[in-house]
Image: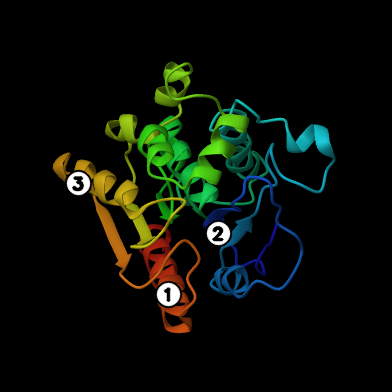
């Protein structure tokens, strides 16, 4: 939990969700987090079920439940900040990259009333297409950790934010790379089209020369500037 200097009124807040999901947020130097805090925002970076660093049981706690308990953990973070009066309840946004982008979208669709906005960076939103368009080794990870798209069709559907975009009530930003083998840009493109057709504010940013991780420094900086600018519009 990163808190700015007290300034009187309850500040805005951002839930900043790590990817993986078998990864974790550590207390290390993160320019993006430090910038957000410097703007007077509270930043919470939850190590939800499925994160590493807390033992094998915690790392496997969301296995075959992806988009379920881990989403609840993210939302519990927002509820905690409201309950403890750490942040303004009407000015909490959610953002994340890769699997964190996926949890951004599950949070926006499963708990739409919690959020002032959401920025999903290189997310996937549809388990069926995300699985079908991934590399073979990545498809194997899906089968080992989530299930089979035919045998577990109901779960694949239930945990795909794409099918529930009509529930979204906050502005959405989607940032993606055209050559992403893990979370194909088509995931963001099809979600953008649906949200636009529904008359909901959605900003799409596509980097034609990037994959899943952005390597060109100008793109890394530009993407984070756009991410912060979007969050600022929803929070400030």
Left or right of 45? Residue 218 is left
Q: Position of residue 138 (x, y in %)?
A: 53, 44
Per the image, the residue denoted by label 3 is 193
Per the image, the residue denoted by label 2 is 11
At x 34%, y 56%, the residue is 173
Q: Which quadrant does the N terminus fall into?
A: bottom right
Q: How many marks?
A: 3
At x 46%, y 28%, the residue is 159
Seen from the viewer's position, the closer of residues 155 and 88 is: 155
Q: Earlier in the sequence, mark 1 or mark 2?
A: 2
Q: Position of residue 178 (x, y in %)?
A: 33, 62
Q: Residue 41, relative to residue 120: is it above or below?
A: below
Seen from the viewer's position, the closer of residues 150 and 50 is: 150
Residue 171 visible to the viewer: no
Per the image, the residue denoted by label 1 is 225
Which residue of the protein is positioned furthest toward the right in this rendering?
A: 55
Q: CA distance from mark 2 to mark 3?
A: 33 Å
Left or right of 165? Residue 77 is right
């Amino acid at each position: 939990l990163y808190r700015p200097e007290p300034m009187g009124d309850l500040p805005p807040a951002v839930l900043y969700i790590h990817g993986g999901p078998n990864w974790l947020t550590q207390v290390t130097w993160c320019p993006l987090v430090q910038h957000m805090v410097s703007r007077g925002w509270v930043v919470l970076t939850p190590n939800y079920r499925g994160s590493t660093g807390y033992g094998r049981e915690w790392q496997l706690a969301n296995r075959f439940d992806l988009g379920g308990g881990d989403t609840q953990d993210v939302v519990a973070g927002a509820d905690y900040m409201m309950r403890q009066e750490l942040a303004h309840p009407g000015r909490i946004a959610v953002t994340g990259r890769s699997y964190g982008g996926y949890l951004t979208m599950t949070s926006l669709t499963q708990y739409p009333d919690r959020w002032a906005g959401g920025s999903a960076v290189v997310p996937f939103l549809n388990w069926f297409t995300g699985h079908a368009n991934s590399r073979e080794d990545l498809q194997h990870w899906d089968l080992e950790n989530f299930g089979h798209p035919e045998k577990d069709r109901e779960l694949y559907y239930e945990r795909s934010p794409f099918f529930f975009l009509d529930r979204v009530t906050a502005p959405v930003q989607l940032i993606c790379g055209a050559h992403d083998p893990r979370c194909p840009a088509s995931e963001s493109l099809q979600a953008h089209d649906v949200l636009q057709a529904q008359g909901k504010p959605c900003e799409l940013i596509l980097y034609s020369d990037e994959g899943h991780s952005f390597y060109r420094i100008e793109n890394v900086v530009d993407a984070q500037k756009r991410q912060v600018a979007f969050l600022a519009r929803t929070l400030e």
